[in-house]
Amino acid sequence: MLAIFLKTLPFFALIAMGYFAGRTKFFTAEATAYLTKFVFWFALSAMLFNFAANLTLAEILDWQFITAYLWGCITVYLIATAVGMVRGLPVAEAAVEAQVAIIGNVGFLGIPMFILLLGPESAGPMLMVLSVDLIVFSSLIVILITGSREGRVSVTTLRTVGLGLIKNPMIVSIVLGIAWSSTGRDLWTPVNEFLTILGAAATPGALFAIGASLAGKTAERLSIAGWLTFCKLVLHPAAVALAALVIFPVADPFAATVMIAAAALPVAGNVYMLAQHYGVAPQRVSAAILVSTAVSIVTVSVVIGLLTGGT
């Protein structure tokens, strides 16, 4: 277990460095925003395209895997929603809390970390997890928030969801990479080297950006943040593990390991962006991101250690 913790420590050290730079104002909010844009639109997109271009569709599209992951996510989503409704929250706020409970930082933290910790073969399962999060749940929260406000799900809402998916560089990168892979041709060497160099900037850039963005977040309403952190770091991986190992057994044990480990990641920053955009509980989401990221320094290592036998 200690060996896994020591391997994850450099990743969280980079986050801490970004946090320190943000708190001391050496790295301003504007600088953080532009670094995030660079990682999101360029470095991470290059990394995802490169991974997808070197995988076959069969290696990425595993319906048993997707079913297990969806079952685990929906279970925790419904639990978080039910608790929110019992507390008297409106639909939009309950939907945001449910999103916090299941959407981990797969793109900026999970993929760079797991590629180095678990090996390049973790790319396929991670791309499946990321695709489900983006296509299913990022669409669902928009539908629930706008539908609750308008009293119905309009064509405009569905158009907004569709355009959001089409414009998301992570989805576009994965789709284009798979499309290239289907041709059976290798990437031209200069193109491959260009993508490798640009993609290499994703890991340090993303981790530093996570830390710098956390510097502007506050930990208000700690009781709610604690509950949502428990959902994300404990209930979510537990439900996904139950689904992947018992209810819908995933054929590849390694893929199941990656899926469960991905479910143990802290809350993703894009949930805050959505909450802020729609004006629904952004401070609550901010606190959950801050608390879950801090706690995950220990819990991610524990989950990965349990799954891999501490090696």
Image (spheres, rainbow, N blue to C red):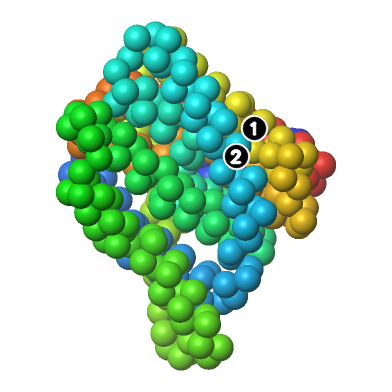
State the image coordinates of residue 73 (x, y, percent, origin top left).
54, 37
Residue 16 in sight here: no
- Location of residue 43 (image quadrant): bottom left
Question: Mark 1: which amino acid?
Answer: Ala
At label 2, counting other C-alpha atoms closer than 10 Å, the crowd grade (few under 14, some 14-19, many 20 or more) is: some
Q: According to the image, label 2 marks what residue?
A: 71
Which residue is painted at 42% across and 39% down in the image? Answer: 268
Which residue is painted at 29% across and 40% down in the image? Answer: 142
Task: Using the image, tell me which numbered label, if any, was put on residue 239.
Answer: 1
- Location of residue 281 (image quadrant): top left
For residue 6, side relative to residue 209 (left or right): right
For residue 60, side relative to residue 85 (left or right): right
Which is nearer the N-term, disc 2 or disc 1? 2
Relative to the observer, which residue lies in front, 6 or 180? 180
Residue 110 in sight here: yes
Q: Quadrant of the N terminus?
A: top right
State the image coordinates of residue 160 (x, y, percent, origin top left).
22, 51
Circles 2 and 1: CB atoms closer than 8 Å: yes
For residue 95, side relative to residue 184 (left or right): left
